Amino acid sequence: MPKKAKEYPEEGEFVIATVKNIHPYGAFLKLDEYPGKEGFMHISEVAPTWVKNIRDYIKEGQKIVAKVIRVDPSKGHIDLSLKRVNQQQRKAKLQEYKRAQKAENLLNMAAEKLGKRFETAWREVWVPLEEEYGEVYAAFEDAAQNGIDVLKGLISDEWIEALKPIIEAYVEVPTVTIDAEFEITVPSSNGVEVIRNALIRARDRANKEAEVEVRFTYQGAPRYRIDISAPDYYKAEEVLESIADEILRVIKEAGGEATLIRKEKRIRKIKKRGG
């Protein structure tokens, strides 16, 4: 079970908690990511409406996403809230927890490879990477995308060598995909050919860049859709701007008109496999 490097959660933090004991006035919960730590949730923090029976909302053994509203390390008190967690926050926390589980599994593979206990791996790898990146899986993603050397100086070479093939084989690298549309018209007998050549030239030039993929799709005159996948949003935007400038220049020289219509960005993941 993934555990945090710090001893106590911070105020405002979202945590995974397991309901331990329920009383008429509230419930005690075990903090899954903070071994040995428990939090208390007053009945008034269970739901936004008046709660008659707390058991209508939570059950013993149930895992929930709770928000930390007060922390007093001197007394060991941690106050939690369920009603202050919205659906988006709950989803984000569960995703973070799943990423931590993946990171733990990969680190455990490296520990077994080196013949070390996971507690040693946690101390020598998990703690420094979490302190640097905020979460260990983000460090693994950085290493998969930019090379294992990004972890040098944070963990020992021994761990780097053990993790390298594991990260290459199993880590999913997030890729941003943005899409847009061009409205293009060229009022001449060879207008279709001019547009086609402009799109192909712009696409092929962009695809020469590392980790960038550009695709054009004909949507029906005068619309052409473009999809750009890149390591991050800024790179995708940079490529889109470059393509737009090239297309607008070529079409204008041919006596036509071109307009770029922006769309929303999307996030997808590509599984990177090592060899």
Image: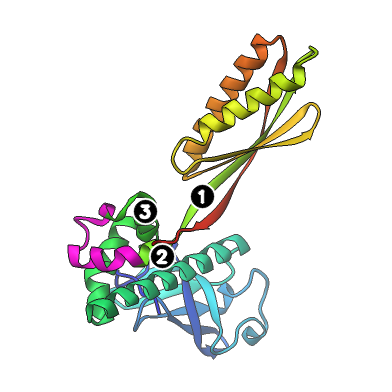
Q: Earlier in the sequence, mark 3 or mark 1?
A: 3
Q: How is the image coloured?
A: rainbow
How far, Cα to Cα, is label 2 from label 3?
Answer: 14 Å
Q: Which residues are magenta?
A: 149-165
**Residue 109, percent from left and from top:** 34, 76
Q: Residue at x 40, y 80 (%)?
A: 1
How far, Cα to Cα, is label 3 from label 1?
Answer: 12 Å
Magenta span: chief secondary structure:
helix
Q: Residue at x 36, y 67 (%)?
A: 166
**Residue 52, percent from left and from top:** 68, 83
**Residue 185, percent from left and from top:** 76, 19
Q: Foreground mark, 2 or 3?
A: 2
Q: Earlier in the sequence, mark 2 or mark 3?
A: 3
Residue designated by label 1: 175
The quadrant of the picture occupied by the C terminus is bottom left
Q: Earlier in the sequence, mark 2 or mark 1?
A: 2
The answer to whether 22 is drawn above or below residue 244 in the figure is below
Q: Is residue 156 located in the magenta-colored stretch of the structure?
A: yes
Q: Amino acid at mark 1?
A: Thr
Are the residues flagged by discs 2 and 1 in contact, CB closer than 8 Å? no
Q: Residue at x 30, y 69 (%)?
A: 6
Of residues 56 and 26, the one nearer the viewer is 56
**Residue 91, percent from left and from top:** 57, 65
Q: Foreground mark, 2 or 1?
A: 2
The answer to whether 274 is drawn above or below residue 18 in the figure is above
Can residue 135 be seen in this snapshot?
A: no
Residue designated by label 2: 169
Q: Amino acid at mark 3?
A: Asp
Residue designated by label 3: 142
Q: Say what secondary structure mark 1 lies in.
A: strand
